[in-house]
Image: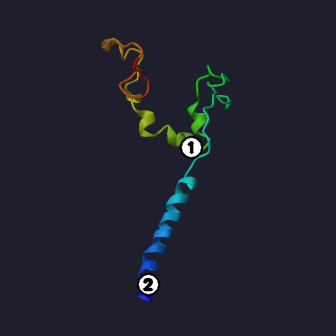
Amino acid sequence: MTTTDLFSTRRWIIPLLGVTAILISAPAAAQYPPIYLLDANGDMIDPINDENASAPFSTKQTCGMCHGFDVITEGYHFQMGWDTVSDDYGLEFGRPWSLSNGFLGRWYP
């Protein structure tokens, strides 16, 4: 192997090793800590171990730990169907359990 061959090999190996190191370390840096569902009192809901399993989860307690609750409630997915919510929305479709046409207040049996 000549000196010229050695330098041309280094020219692509060193950047390749650098990119590989970044790709290997990126997923570890991007991981979140475990997220647990919390009820309105901030108590953890753990249906697997039957701890507080019947309590409804609180978006404010669960998501509000990391995200501003006022910002969350203005989000697109949070608001879908809010403008059509009514107690009798699903009656005409034979689905009295549906309260709107969006994600909010809708349930598919």
Query: Looking at the rendering, in which quadrant would you find the C terminus?
Result: top left
Q: Amino acid at mark 1?
A: Gly
Give the labeled residue for mark 1. 68
Task: Identify whether 86 is placed above or below 60.
Answer: above
Q: Earlier in the sequence, mark 2 or mark 1?
A: 2
Query: Looking at the rendering, in which quadrant would you find the N terminus?
Result: bottom left
| Closer to viewer: mark 2 or mark 1 | 2
SS for tag 2?
A: loop
Most extreme residue toward the left is 92
Most extreme residue toward the bottom is 3
* Side (left or right) of 48 relative to 22: right
The residue at 48%/66% (across/down) is 19
Quarter where residue 54 is shown:
top right
Q: Amino acid at mark 2?
A: Met
SS for tag 1?
A: loop
x%, y% of residue 32? 58, 47
The residue at 49%/74% (across/down) is 14
